[in-house]
Image (spheres, grey):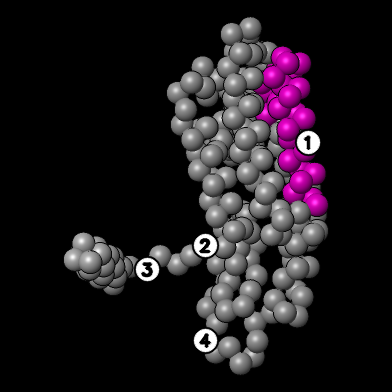
Amino acid sequence: MMRKYGMTRLHFLAGLLFLSGCASSPVEQARTPWEELKQQTRLCLSDVRSDREFSSIADKVTLGGTYDPDVYFELAGIKDRPTAEEKIVIRKWVARLKACYKIKAESYAYEPAGVAKWAAMTDDEQLSLLSEFSRGDLSYGRFAVKRLEIDMKYRGEITRAVSADYKRPENQPQKKDSAIPKAPSDSSSTCGWEGKQWVCRSL
């Protein structure tokens, strides 16, 4: 009986310590599933970008994205095709990217239907291009150009779909909402009022 009582006291004390720890530390706001998947996608791409295993091609492709304005024209001018050794590295890189795209695709379940449709089409074409490139069918320059072409091909459709969703009555700021903060401004995303806050989606 004493042993059971002692264990109960231990559990009670542990609970107090846990609660006191929570009270003294800031409470982190829970992310929505959409935010969590977006964060996982960013981390996935960041890990790919910093992986030294891909250092031999790091100056010839944009490792963690489809387009980097700082180096695009330099990459687009590379006429060489991947060597046999580089193709091995590229295949590993493509496999890692596909895993990131898979995480990204899960977030479409939480997107408006129009946004999900065009974003998925963009991803499908990018994945097909990656497969083509991994076979050595394209020069580095041609690969860079086609990546940007695909990205721009559906960007307008995605922007229009996001805009249409934000214009729905339920996503408009209500007149009773006082002191509504100014919408964030970012050329790589579009923002709309949802509930009591601005929510931005990357393009």
> Label 4 neighbourhood size at 10 Å, few (<14), some (14-19), many (20+)?
few
What's the amino acid at mark 3?
Val
Classed neighbour count for the residue bearing mark 3: other residues with Cα under 10 Å, few (<14), some (14–19), many (≥20): few
Residue depicted at x 68% and y 23%: 141
The part of the image, by quadrant, that contains residue 8 is: bottom left
Image quadrant assignment for residue 69: top right
Q: Are marks 2 and 1 in contact (CB under 8 Å)?
A: no
Could you say where residue 32 lies in the image, as x and y percent from the top left? 57, 63
Give the label on residue 179, or none.
4
Q: Nearer the viewer, mark 4 or mark 3?
A: 3
Magenta portion: prevailing SS class: helix
Which amino acid, mark 1?
A: Glu
**Residue 24 seen in the current view:** no
Q: Position of residue 11 (x, y in %)?
A: 27, 65
On screen, 115 above or below 98? below
Position of 90 relative to 9 (above/below):
above
Q: Is residue 133 magenta?
A: yes
Q: Is residue 16 above or below residue 133?
A: below
Find residue 125 and name its label. Answer: 1
- Closer to the chain start, of discs 4 and 3, is 3
Crowdedness of circle 1 by 10 Å Cα count: few (<14), some, many (20+)? some
Q: CA distance from mark 4 to mark 3?
A: 25 Å
Q: Which residue is mark 2?
A: 31
Single out the residue that lies furthest toward the top: 84
Instruction: Point out the stretch of residues depicted in magenta.
Output: 117-144
Secondary element at image label 1: helix
- In reply to whether residue 115 is colored magenta, the answer given is no
| Depth check, front residue: 107 or 174 | 107
Which numbered disc, 3 or 1, marks the residue closer to the eye?
Answer: 3
Crowding at label 2, few (<14), some or many (≥20) Cα neighbours within 10 Å? few
Whether tag 3 and tag 1 are in contact, CB under 8 A, the answer is: no
